[in-house]
Image (cartoon, helix red, strand yellow):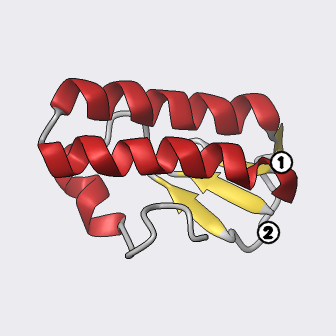
Amino acid sequence: MIVRIMGEGQVRLDDSHVVELNKLDDELLQAMEAGDEAGFRRTLGALLDSVRRLGTPLPDDALEPSELILPSSDATLEEVREMLSDDGLIPG
């Protein structure tokens, strides 16, 4: 799976990591629904850190279609809310 982190680039991530990322995505959604800014920041950071740690960065000149687009680490709660689907940021 190719994941784009807005403002950073793309990483190739093995599909086996989706379960772990979905747990963080669920926590992020809960923090957003509760209006918990601190929880939102913490969980968004953990989600992006996990993608960076588990994934392999693609070269800057690679133009692969992204299967998943995640917000930048400085995205606001409102910006992320606009990106959400019914499943959160990560489908499934």
Find residue 46 and report its horizontal and vertical position in percent: 52, 28
43 displayed left or right of 31: right
Residue type of the residue flagged with mark 1: Leu
Q: In the displayed structure, would residue 78 be above or below residue 31?
A: below
Measured as percent of width and height from the top left, residue 85 is found at: 39, 74
Query: Which residue appears at 17% of the width and 34% of the height?
Result: 36
Q: Please name the residue that numbered disc 1 is placed on.
A: 58
Q: Residue furthest left?
A: 35
Q: SS of the residue at dot 1? A: loop
Q: CA distance from mark 2 to mark 1?
A: 9 Å
Around disc 2, counting alpha carbons within 10 Å, would you say few (fewer than 14), some (14 to 19), or many (20 or more)? Answer: few
Q: Earlier in the sequence, mark 2 or mark 1?
A: 1
Q: What's the residue at 83%, 48% (across, down)?
A: 58
Residue flagged by tag 2: what amino acid is it? Glu
Seen in the picture, residue 13 relative to 88 is either above or below; the reply is above
Mark 2–mark 1 contact, CB under 8 Å?
A: yes
Q: Quadrant of residue 35?
A: top left
Circle 1 Cα neighbour tier, 10 Å, few/some/many (<14 / 14–19 / ≥20): some
For residue 40, side relative to residue 34 (left or right): right
Point out residue 26 in the picture as x, y percentages from the top left corner: 44, 50
Residue where numbered disc 2 is placed: 64
Confirm whether residue 7 shows in the render. no
Task: Name the image quarter holding the N terminus.
Answer: bottom right
Name the image quarter holding residue 34: top left
Q: Residue 69: percent from the left, percent from the top?
A: 55, 61
Q: Is residue 46 above or below residue 18?
A: above
Q: Is residue 19 left or right of residue 82?
A: right
